[in-house]
Image (spheres, rainbow, N blue to C red):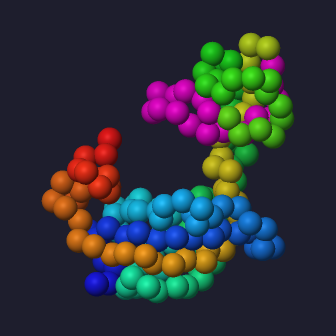
């Protein structure tokens, strides 16, 4: 079965930057899963997945525009320490969780303060060309519920 819209795809990946520095890998855990055609993964990777079948292995290089976007200097904000979900001493460069109107979000600390904190809300991989080594583990038909909700559900039904 080939990857196409409304199919659930399970895959393992290794992610590195242009210089070959390892950024992430799924190989120490379960494969990633997404519902193809529903924007569940970055655009450049989803495009390359189309038409592949279980067992396929491939490499793809994704430019920032098709990955996590270009870095925006306007993505710097000053927020209240009350929004910070991460506990402990904050240092410049740390990735932390903050509470937003749209749920938790990961941001990078620019400058910590006592009551306010300056953060960068760009995705940590924004502005980077991303290099993926991918192994497609499984492709299956999505359930009607998964298609209606636009994402994969857990092995025992609704996973959220």
108 drawn magenta:
yes
Relative to residue 59, is residue 124 depicted above or below? Answer: above
How far across and down, in percent of the image, does residue 106 sit?
61, 39
| Residue 69 in the image: above or below residue 113 | below
- Would you say 62 lies left or right of 43 here? right
Specify the quadrant of the image occupied by residue 52: bottom left
Picture residue at 33% right of the left edge, 75% below the top: 139
Residue 79 shows up from this direction: no
For the point 75% across and 29% down, the residue is 118
Displayed quadrant of residue 13? bottom right
Specify the farthest residue to the top. Answer: 115
User: Quick one: 115 or 146, which is closer to the camera?
Assistant: 146
Residue 68, relative to residue 19: is it above or below?
Answer: above
Check the picture and name the quadrant holding the N terminus: bottom left
Across and down, in percent, residue 44 comes to 52, 72
Residue at left offset 37%, top offset 70%: 9
Q: Quadrant of residue 76?
A: top right
Residue 134 seen by the camera:
yes
* Residue at x 81% of width, y 73% of height: 19
**Looking at this rendering, what residue extends furthest in the left direction?**
144
Which one is in front, 14 or 107? 14
Give the image location of residue 78, x and y in percent.
71, 26
Image quarter of the C terminus: top left
Q: Is residue 119 above or below residue 143?
A: above
Magenta part of the protein: which range?
A: 97-113
The verdict on residue 99 being magenta is: yes
């Amino acid at each position: 079965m080939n990857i196409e819209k409304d199919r659930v795809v399970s895959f393992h990946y290794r992610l590195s930057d242009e210089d070959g520095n390892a950024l992430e890998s799924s190989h120490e855990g379960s494969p990633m899963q997404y519902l193809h055609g529903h924007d569940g993964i970055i655009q450049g990777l989803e495009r390359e997945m189309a038409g592949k079948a279980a067992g396929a292995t491939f490499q793809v290089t994704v430019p920032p525009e098709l990955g996590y976007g270009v870095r925006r200097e306007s993505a710097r904000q000053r927020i209240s320490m009350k929004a910070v979900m991460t506990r402990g001493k904050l240092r410049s460069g740390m990735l932390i969780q903050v509470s937003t109107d749209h749920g938790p979000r990961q941001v990078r600390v620019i400058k910590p303060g006592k009551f306010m904190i300056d953060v960068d809300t760009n995705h940590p991989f924004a502005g980077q060309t991303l290099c993926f080594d991918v192994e497609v583990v499984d492709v299956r038909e999505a359930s009607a519920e998964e298609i209606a909700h636009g994402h994969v559900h857990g092995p025992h039904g609704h996973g959220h």
